[in-house]
Image (cartoon, rainbow, N blue to C red):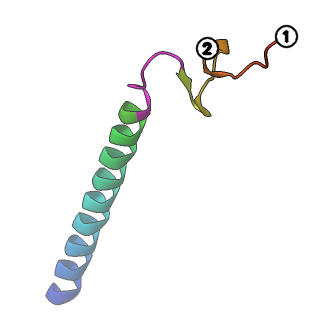
Amino acid sequence: MFEYQLHEIRHAELVRRAESEWLARHVRRADHTGRRPAGHGPEGRVSDSRNRHEPGA
């Protein structure tokens, strides 16, 4: 019985640790995507008219 209780305690500890690590990764990922420079949306860089080649008249 004692071994089973230790097993359950250890299992609960591992589950809590895995959940906290998942949450930390999720927060870091969300924080990282929030620090994009201006002009960069979630889809990537937005081109403007200065980057386009226009043929001469």
Q: Is residue 10 left or right of residue 33?
A: left
Residue at horizontal 61 percent and vertical 14 percent from the top? 50
The crowd level at tag 2 (other Cα within 10 Å; few <14, some 14-19, many 20+) is few
User: Residue most toward the top?
Assistant: 57
**Residue at image location 62% in from the left, 34% down from the top:** 43
Residue placed under numbered mark 1 in the picture: 57
In the rendered picture of this protein, how many numbered marks are placed on residues? Answer: 2
Depth check: 14 or 43 in front? Answer: 43
Q: Position of residue 11 (x, y in %)?
A: 27, 73
Give the camera-side residue of 27 and 16: 27
Q: Is residue 30 left or right of residue 56?
A: left
What residue range appears in magenta? 33-39
Q: Secondary structure at mark 2?
A: helix
**Helix, strand or loop at disc 1?**
loop
Query: Does the magenta-highlighted stretch encompass residue 38?
Result: yes
Sequence order check, earlier mark of 1 and 2 = 2
Instruction: Name the residue carrying label 2.
Output: 50
